[in-house]
Image (spheres, rainbow, N blue to C red):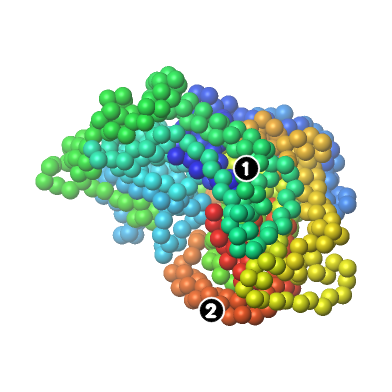
Amino acid sequence: MSKLILLHTSYHLTPIHRRACNSVVSPSLFTPSSLRPQSISPSPPLSLRSISARAFDSSSPETKEEELKESDGEIVNKTTTADTKEYPSGEFQFEKASAWKSFVVKLRMLIAFPWQRVKKGSVLTIKLRGQVSDQLKSRFSSGLSLPQICENLMKAAYDPRISGVYLQIESLNCGWGKVEEIRRHILDFKKSGKFVVAYVPACGEKEYYLASACQEIYAPPSAYFSLFGLTVQSSFVRGVLEKVGIEPQVERIGKYKSAGDQLARTTMSEENCEMLTALLDNIYGNWLDVISSTRGKKREDIENFINEGVYQVEKLKEEGWITNIQYDDEVISMLKERLGVQKEKTLPMVDYRKYSKVQQWTVGLSGGKDKIAIIRASGSISRVRGGLSLPGSSIIGEQFIEKIRTVRESKRYKAAIIRIDSPGGDALASDLMWREIRLLAASKPVIASMSDVAASGGYYMAMAADAIVAENLTLTGSIGVVTGKFNLGKLYEKIGFNKEIISRGKYAEVLAAEQRSFRPEEAEIFAKSAQNAYKQFRDKAALSRSMTVDKMEEVAQGRVWTGNDAASRGLVDAIGGLSRAVAIAKLKANIPQDKQVALVELARPSPTLPEILSGIGASLVGVDRTMKEVLQELTFSDGVQARMEGIMFQRLEGASQANPIFSLFKDYFGSL
């Protein structure tokens, strides 16, 4: 598995180029708003596309259903109308509240619950540090939630009680797509005329990317700055496995499909090197462009400064990278003076968690009568929930399909947005979800909005939508599959373990016999199975994106693209965030752009306290069971995977016991 480790980065508004990679699951970057294209029109639909052609016809849902027919088990649209209109940008426009609206908002604030009240002149403080989830968070959940961060900045822009925002930015554990979304909302907040100040005690490229959107940047004299550039790394454990007597037998389809390389190879392949180098060049070049534009410097000067290896905070101030060198208390004292707060008094502040309890309704941001459903899909894809997985930690095909069907059968929703942040997973689950999204798109507009990554199975889901919106650096594509098994013969010899199998059927032992390598006929059917899965993925991608199979093959082969590069190759329709996806959904649902809509989140907030305690209990039981199974029969079964990084050994439905050794390998390699 290849892992692109980025010494972080940052950017501005919506769309235009490149995005960083963590061949494993990571990053995203950006370009300055001055370079952003207003829209990227989707590729002209062929007769098979039920996507953008539906956006502008006036036929009823019933007529649309009649336009669809079944052909070889796939949905086919007879419509051939080209979608020539540009997509709306969804760019935020701050509108000053009228006297009446201001009165209503103040009245609502008076009757708000105590925990929703905020002192006038308060500063909203947000500590951006650690992991940022694309899911909603419950009150028992720790960590940051991207939807709540963005909502807080939006509310604060209109909240007359909020005078400004104080961001404390430290090491972030998220991709560039989320960073871009946060940065966009910082820039949107600034349109209100209120201040945004950043404090950066620990800062790399990604953190500085965010901070550069603020009006002022402060750092303590002992701050850790590591603006040294970006790197890409690939780790290989084939040699380690050989030493302990394990032979991985991996079948990956697509010359750029690097998932499984960490097991099957000892060095990086030429194709993988080519792909990762292109991604890295994309990201680094984009970072230089954005920062040079933000700081008002030439790109060459920024690059030269990075290559000097500067870490002294004083030098950063001299060169204009930060506003001043101050401790946190000094920044707060400065804000008190700016807001006219007496020195002996405390600066009124409200933190991220408390402000999250303030309802949009309170500040006059409640939606209209038209409802758009938002269905979030984050994490690895599996068809059914595993015994040790926590709620909200992955995409469970069965549960996701239930939500899709709920939206399809309901008349309350005018459109739906599938918000995807996934490197993929189970190919079967991905295909089943693709089918349900296609059925939903036959009755109402469906827009896919990509976050950090929507690759392999994640892209499989997205390509079923009417339109795909990606961030500039969203990792996407990776149209390919991987599957495999371990040959533990030598390991069994070393530990004195023996396994004998009695079987009926020529291929009965294909997955059962992990104590030996494949026989020639078994290797052949194993490879054909993977080829068949890839062909289905590629052909459905061609169908969904209105391309010929040959054209799709050129951009498939397991290659990962940044959002902007994917858009230029027809894999993505528009560059932007959730706001642009909403604007496109309104367009396709014939809702005026200036009309408010209610966004209804269908996804459950991630784990509550009882769920966490329940998960811990399940984990303890699972450990005990695993230890016992080590002494029992060792079995192994495998499923085809459509995932970007790692290799996911999946138990097939009906297998009695999962091999505990492989479970441990799966957990380990899946976390790399």
**Residue 230 location, x and y as percent?**
48, 36
Instruction: Please indicate, yes or no, whether residue 467 appears anywhere in the rendered image.
Output: no
**Residue 529 location, x and y as percent?**
81, 56
Mark identifier at residue 624:
2
Residue at left offset 48%, top offset 40%? 6
Instruction: Please indicate, yes or no, whether residue 545 appears anywhere in the rendered image.
Output: yes
Q: Quadrant of residue 312?
A: top left
Q: Pick the residue in front: 652 or 503.
A: 503
Classify mark 1: helix, strand or loop. Answer: loop
Residue at left offset 60%, top offset 76%? 630
431 versus 469 height, above or below: below
Marks counted in the figure total 2
- Answer left or right for 5 relative to 458: left
- Residue ranking furthest to the left: 344
The residue type indicated by label 2 comes to Asp
- Answer left or right for 484 relative to 158: right
Residue that numbered label 1 is attached to: 268
18 versus 385 height, above or below: above
**Residue 608 location, x and y as percent?**
46, 67
The Cα atoms of the two marked residues, 1 and 2, are separated by 38 Å
Residue at left offset 28%, top offset 28%? 315
The C terminus lies in quadrant: bottom right
Q: Quadrant of residue 227?
A: top left
The residue type indicated by label 1 comes to Met
Mark identifier at residue 352:
none
- Answer left or right for 406 relative to 93: right
